[in-house]
Amino acid sequence: MNDPKISPTKRIALVAHDNQKDELLDWVEHNQELLSRHKLYATGTTGRVVHEQSGLEINRMQSGPLGGDQQIGAKISLGEIDFLIFFWDPLSPHPHDPDVMALLRMAVIWNIPLACNRSSADYIVTSPLMEGEYERAIPDFQTYVERLPARDTGPSLKE
């Protein structure tokens, strides 16, 4: 279940396309002390390079093209990620663009803070809301879930 309360210890996902990894590494170095007080997640390669450069503890998923973007998106939908820092490269083609769009969609659907560049990441981590508990609004999707009548799908596998 998606809990609207974001605790003072944030669960932060870090993602960066290859052309943006150096920018993310520079940003992490600049914010290392702050980030060390939170629980960090990252896609595989990003997590490895951030850990190697900063020493920060990172919960690593698969590499983005191998399912890491989808793993982070799933964690967002389960309420296990509080915000997403995604240094995205919109000028280069990526074979896993559908996964990238799905990840961004999950952040928007579940109303978590999302930074796609250094400026927006700076705004998020310097916000007074970073220090305490925050209760975000979670959209009510009940109408969407109930939009179609239940159908008989035949015998279940349990029978």
Image (spheres, grey):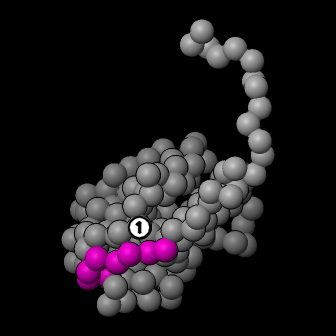
Mark 1 is surrounded, within 10 Å at the Cα level, by few (under 14), some (14 to 19) or many (20 or more) other residues, namely: some
User: Residue at position x 76%, y 25% from top?
Assistant: 152
Residue 48 sits inside the magenta stretch: no
Q: Between residues 7 and 12, which one lies in front from this camera angle? A: 7
User: Residue at position x 40%, y 56% from top?
Assistant: 80
Q: Position of residue 114 (x, y in %)?
A: 52, 74
The amino acid on which the numbered mark 1 sits, given as a three-letter code, is Pro
Q: Position of residue 14 (x, y in %)?
A: 44, 64
Q: Is residue 55 above or below residue 115?
A: above
- Residue that carries the numbered disc 1 in the rendered image: 4
Q: Position of residue 140 (x, y in %)?
A: 58, 64
Q: Which residues are magenta?
A: 130-137
The picture quadrant where one finds residue 142 is bottom right
The picture quadrant where one finds residue 117 is bottom right
Q: Is residue 153 above or below residue 61?
A: above
Q: Is residue 52 left or right of residue 110?
A: left
Single out the residue that lies furthest toward the top.
159
Q: Quadrant of the C terminus?
A: top right
User: Residue at position x 44%, y 47% from top?
Assistant: 61
SS for callout 1: loop
Q: Between residues 48 and 77, which one lies in front from this camera angle? A: 77
Single out the residue that lies furthest toward the front.
149
Q: Is residue 25 left or right of residue 9?
A: right
The picture quadrant where one finds residue 42 is bottom left
Q: Between residues 37 and 138, which one lies in front from this camera angle? A: 138
